[in-house]
Structures are given as structure tokens and as C-alpha cells.
């Protein structure tokens, strides 16, 4: 029978190892993302015709099928939210602040975050799971034996396509929301353009515009890099991987990073 003192010390050892494994896993995700960014900025990564063909294919399949649907969803959300805010503001005598509130909440905060989550759930997390399946079936090892880097051939096109899709959806949906917010308040008359452009420039001042751009880019990188790192974890991690699902790992880590980025942007915009 195991002595009682030994049984009491086992949970302490597990509690000591778990934070270390957590830190190591996050460090390797960061390192893996840095490797992908270096490859993305290296011209030699694009010399392979198969890599360029894979990049074009993934960029099309990750963006085109969801572009119209997400734009329509953003349009519907804009019309509903604008109507609610305008009617509520009028009842309190705050009509002059209604449109600015819609732009700040919808265009500045909600749409970039929603676009990133939409791309993650629709494209990048399934792509990360597909990479994990390739790893399990020996696809990566076969590419190495053929003298091809699996990061360049399989991982990099999916990462770039995911980032492109997130940025494209966010940019187009913000434009649609800005146009529909104007139409919901001023209808088809150009009489409101001076006031609207003045309000828009007040909201998107240089500092807010810079934060908005950086946040959108980092959202795109987060939803494209983290699922890829989780999918290729066993091949490029220094420590042995656990048996957790690659999709679940990517989802949890991605949500944590998105929450951190959104919190930092809110602090930069309003404090």
C-alpha cells in the first residue's frame, strides 16, 4: 500500500507541472507564429508554384463563399442597431449622439471582432484540424522526405488566406455598416453628408484609426496563426503534445488572445 505522505505530495507535483506546460505551450505558439510571419515576409517562400496555387485556392475558398453572407449579416445588424439607438436617443433628447454611438459600437468594435470570429469558426479552425489530420496520416513526413518544407507548402497558404479573409470581411462590412447607418438616419438625401463626415472624422481621429488598424490586423493574425499552430503542434513543439483536440486548443487560445486584444484596444480608445 502506498504510504499516506506520498499520496499527499502527488497533487502538488501535478499542480507544479501544469503551469509550466501551459507556459511552454503558449511560448511555442508564439514561436510558431513568428516562424510563419518570417516565412510570409520572405520572397523565397513564394517561388514554389504549388505554394502560390495553394495560396490562391485557399484565399478564394476562405473568402468568397462567406463574403456575401457576412456582409448581409452586418447590414441587418446595422439597420436593427441603428434603429434601436436612434429611437432610444430621441426619447431622451440625445439624437445628436445616436449616430456617433452606432459608429463607435458597431464599426469600431463589433464588426472587426465578429469578422475575426466568423473567419475562425468557418475557415481557420477547420484548416487547423485538417493540418492535424495531415500530421497524423504522415503527410508532413512525406513532404520532408521529398525535400519540401510542410510549413511552406501546407501551413503558410492557410495562414495567409485566413488573415486575408478576416481583413477583407472586416473592411467590407465596416464600409457597408457606415453607408447603411447614414441611410437609416438621413435616407437618400445628401443633406446630411457634412454633419456625417464631421462626426465620422471626430470618431476616427488619427489615434483611434491607428488603434483600429492595428487591432484588425492582430485579430486577423490571431485567428489565422493560432489554429495553424495547434494543428501542427506535434511536429514543431519542443515538448510532447497532449491528446487534446487541435480544434479545441486553437479555439481556447484564440478566444483568450482576442479578448486580450479587445481589452487593450478599449483602453487605448477610451482611457
Image (cartoon, rainbow, N blue to C red):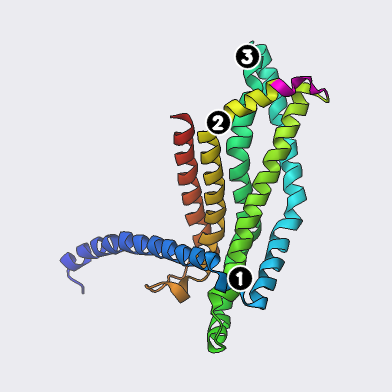
Q: Position of residue 258 (x, y in %)?
A: 50, 48
What is the CA distance from the residue labelled 3 to the residue labelled 1?
A: 51 Å
Query: Depth check: 80 or 215 in front?
Result: 215
What is the CA distance from the residue labelled 2 to the residue labelled 3?
A: 22 Å
| Part of the protein shown in magenta | 189-194
Residue at the spot x=56%, y=70% of the render?
43
Task: Tell me, for residue 205, which label it has, or none.
Answer: 2
- Mark 3 crowd level (few <14, some 14–19, many ≥20, 10 Å Cα): few
Q: Is residue 33 visible?
A: yes
- Mark 2 crowd level (few <14, some 14–19, many ≥20, 10 Å Cα): few
In this figure, what is the number of numbered marks? 3
The residue that label 1 is drawn on is 130
The residue that label 3 is drawn on is 94
Query: Depth check: 204 or 12 in front?
Result: 204
201 drawn magenta: no
Give the structural element (helix, strand or loop) at label 1. helix
Q: Is residue 133 visible?
A: no
Q: Earlier in the sequence, mark 2 or mark 3?
A: 3
Query: Depth check: 136 or 160 in front?
Result: 160
What is the CA distance from the residue labelled 1 to the residue labelled 2?
A: 42 Å
Left or right: 191, with 144 as reference point:
right
Instruction: From the image, state whether disc 3 or disc 1 is nearer to you.
Output: 3
Residue at the spot x=51%, y=40% of the render?
211
The answer to whether the residues at label 1 and label 2 have Cβ atoms under 8 Å apart is: no
Amino acid at each position: 500500500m502506498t504510504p499516506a505522505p506520498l499520496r499527499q505530495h502527488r497533487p502538488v507535483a501535478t499542480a507544479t507541472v501544469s503551469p509550466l506546460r501551459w507556459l511552454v505551450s503558449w511560448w511555442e505558439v508564439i514561436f510558431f507564429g513568428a516562424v510563419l510571419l518570417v516565412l510570409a515576409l520572405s520572397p523565397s517562400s513564394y517561388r514554389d508554384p504549388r505554394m502560390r496555387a495553394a495560396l490562391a485556392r485557399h484565399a478564394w475558398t476562405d473568402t468568397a463563399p462567406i463574403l456575401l453572407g457576412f456582409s448581409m449579416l452586418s447590414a441587418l445588424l446595422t439597420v436593427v442597431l441603428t434603429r434601436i439607438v436612434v429611437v432610444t436617443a430621441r426619447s431622451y433628447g440625445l439624437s445628436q449622439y445616436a449616430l456617433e454611438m452606432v459608429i463607435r459600437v458597431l464599426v469600431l468594435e463589433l464588426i472587426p471582432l465578429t469578422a475575426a470570429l466568423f473567419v475562425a469558426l468557418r475557415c481557420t479552425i477547420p484548416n487547423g484540424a485538417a493540418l492535424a489530420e495531415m500530421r497524423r496520416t504522415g503527410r508532413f513526413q512525406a513532404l520532408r522526405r521529398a525535400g519540401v518544407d510542410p510549413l511552406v507548402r501546407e501551413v503558410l497558404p492557410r495562414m495567409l488566406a485566413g488573415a486575408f479573409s478576416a481583413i477583407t470581411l472586416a473592411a467590407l462590412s465596416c464600409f457597408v455598416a457606415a453607408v447603411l447607418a447614414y441611410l437609416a438616419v438621413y435616407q437618400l438625401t445628401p443633406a446630411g453628408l457634412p454633419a456625417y463626415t464631421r462626426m465620422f472624422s471626430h470618431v476616427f481621429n488619427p489615434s483611434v484609426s491607428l488603434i483600429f488598424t492595428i487591432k484588425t490586423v492582430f485579430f486577423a493574425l490571431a485567428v489565422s496563426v493560432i489554429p495553424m499552430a495547434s494543428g501542427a503542434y506535434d511536429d514543431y513543439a519542443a515538448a510532447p503534445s497532449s491528446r487534446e483536440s487541435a480544434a479545441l486548443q486553437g479555439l481556447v487560445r484564440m478566444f483568450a488572445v482576442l479578448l486580450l486584444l479587445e481589452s487593450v484596444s478599449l483602453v487605448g480608445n477610451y482611457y
